[in-house]
Image (spheres, rainbow, N blue to C red):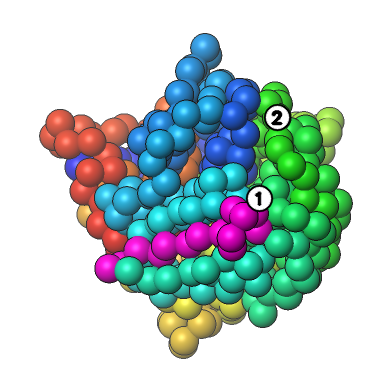
Amino acid sequence: MDKFRIRGGNPLKGSVSISGAKNSALPCMAASLLTPETVTLHNLPYARDIITQRRLLEDLGATVLTPELRTHKINASHIEIFEAPYELVKTMRASVLALGPLLARFGKAKVSLPGGCAIGTRPIDLHLKGFEQLGAEVRLEAGNVVASAPAGGRLKGTEIRFEKVTVTGTENLMMAATLARGTTVLHNAACEPEITDLCQLLNRMGARVRGGGTPTIEIDGVEALGGAEHTIIPDRIETGTFIVAAAITGGELEIKDCRPEHLSSVIKKLTEVGVEIEELNPSTLRARSKRGLKSHDVTTEPYPQFPTDMQAQYMALMTQSEGRSVIAETVFENRFMHASELQRMGARIQLQGRLAIVDGPTPLTGAPIQASDLRASASLVLAGLVARGETIIDRVYHIDRGYEKIEAKLRAVGADIERIRESVTAPSSGATHQDAAA
Ligand code: UD1
């Protein structure tokens, strides 16, 4: 398993380009299953989860051409298998996004039930309840979800109210409803920019979806969908991670190819803390911290509030800020695994259920530490960049799942970071069901 060796202390300087959003790319790739025509996606990040999703599509029978590194031409005209097996779902929970499209187009789908994962139990009950409301029969068989459409093969539009905001749940139901008979209304839908992006792709394919990006989404079902071409939005979490990287190292970064309006809550919070963030143009930010940072509390919540996917990186920053910060994680249970590793580097953090109380600033010292999930890994890299001495981060396959070549991007702006290739084992092959946190 690969490791990162980081020697901390270098202020980052220069410019970095943001890749496409993994969390938008995954549902958009799944949406290609809704049509026999070709869907062309541009700006896919070169990350492990994208390779896993491609493998899933190919296993189902789709052909995927890659005329350029970040472009996939996906054709799902000959789907022969309707199943996402455990081997894939255990390494990437977002494989459940195949359920909605398969059920809508072919009237049947089987997806292995994701087990517990490193950031909590993360059930998919709300997805399944929604499919049932669309008229599907859903059974659990030997660890698999087996879903079938009602007689006649088509789902039936209806009103669905999510008890809790769920991102992939909203995406799965939205995709399923595009080919249903009649109109579906999703209440309490997730409003993340990735939902809006998927909505745009679906409408380009001929779907009739209104209200994407708001809590109420209306979908008029159509008979069939066609091919389309679509460019994935920039990754707002990668953008936020690089803002924190500039701030925590006392450096200055120009962050290009991003969409600042997708991270207003993050920019607002980091500005309160004392990070100087300037919008140079609609796709470029400049981030720096010239003065001391002041600790502030934060609560993670669904979009447009502060994202849970930035909580770990924010915690690393709070270890270097003056005063006490209370970080409340309301989206996931058990999403503080990075705290114990940060403590090993010298951070002062107390955990109380869903609260983390961070006292800073504390000088961090390099140590051998272990990544536990995707965003936790980003937090440890950030801590390593500011720690005295050498930090070795084990299990970096977690970070490879969602960040495109993070060590190369960081090195290009002055970080002393290198990948240690330990063996020929592929990054994801060490993954277990404990690792499927996205
Ligand atoms: C997505 C993102 C992930 C992000 C998360 C929250 C992708 C591929 N992943 O994950 O990066 O951290 O949104 O912004 O887009 N829940 C249920 N039942 C369900 C579904 C969800 O109880 O059927 C709960 C979850 O356990 C969690 C909360 O709802 O507590 C939100 O989860 P959800 O929005 O579904 O997260 P994901 O879509 O899995």
134 in the magenta segment: no
Residue 221 or residue 50, whichever sits in front = 221
Q: Which residue is mark 1?
A: 175
Label 2 residue SS: loop
Q: Which residue is mark 2?
A: 226
Q: Which residues are magenta?
A: 142-155
Please indicate whether residue 224 sits to the left or right of residue 385 in the image.
Answer: right
In the rendered image, residue 29, in percent from the top left (x then y), is placed at 55, 37
Q: Amino acid at mark 2?
A: Gly
In the rendered image, residue 351, in percent from the top left (x then y), is placed at 44, 82
Tell which tag, 2 or 1, sits nearer the viewer.
Answer: 2
Q: Kindly give the residue lying farthest to the front in the view shown.
A: 152
Query: Is ligand 1 less than 8 Å from the beta carbon at label 1?
Result: no
In the rendered image, residue 203, in percent from the top left (x then y), is placed at 79, 39
Query: Is ligand 1 less than 8 Å from the beta carbon at label 2?
Result: no
State the image quarter where residue 186 is shown: bottom right
- Classify mark 2: residues with Cα within 10 Å, few (<14), some (14-19) or many (20+): some
144 in the magenta segment: yes
Residue 204 or residue 432, whichever sits in front = 204
Does residue 317 lie above or below 239 as drawn?
Answer: below
Tell me which label, 2 or 1, sits earlier in the chain: 1
What is the spatial separation of the Cα atoms under label 2 and label 1, in whole angstroms? Answer: 14 Å
